[in-house]
Image (tube, grey):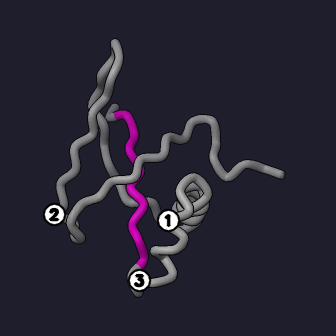
Amino acid sequence: MTSVVQEQDTIVALATAIGRGAIALVRLSGPEAFAIVASEAQSAERERLWAAVKKFNPFYAQYEKITDRQIPVVVLRRAS
């Protein structure tokens, strides 16, 4: 069976207000800190990552059943 999580993926679940103006704090620990860029995952990338989120934390699968909105998946990447 192929894993839905790829080696380079890091899954972060943020609890914020709904909307594009929502603010979240991302804290990096360790000797290296770097700037990040956030974007909302789309299409196949979103489906792959959303499956990984639900596998990691089944609460999200239950929540998905009781809401009528698509839950955003935010991808954090190192800024270039």
Which residue, as the protein is rendered here, is positioned at the far top?
31
Give the label, 3 or 1, closer to the camera: 1
Question: Callout 2 environment at 10 Å: few (<14), some (14 to 19), or many (20+)?
Answer: few
x, y percent for residue 33 = 30, 22
What is the span of residues highlighted in magenta in the rendered image? 70-78
The residue pinned by badge 3 equals 67
Mark 1 belongs to which amino acid?
Phe
Q: Classify residue 44 as left or right of residue 42.
A: right
The residue pinned by badge 1 equals 59
On screen, residue 62 above or below 4: below
Q: Residue at x 49, y 40 (%)?
A: 10
Q: Which mark is residue 28?
A: none
Q: Residue at x 41, y 87 (%)?
A: 68
x, y percent for residue 20 = 21, 66
Pick the residue in front: 61 or 24.
61
Mark 2 belongs to which amino acid?
Gly
Mark 2 and mark 3: span between their CA atoms?
21 Å
Question: Callout 1 environment at 10 Å: few (<14), some (14 to 19), or many (20+)?
Answer: few
Point out the tag, 2 or 3, that comes first from the N-terminus: 2
Q: Residue at x 33, y 23 (%)?
A: 29
Q: Which mark is residue 21?
A: 2
Mark 2 residue element: loop
Mark 1 residue element: helix
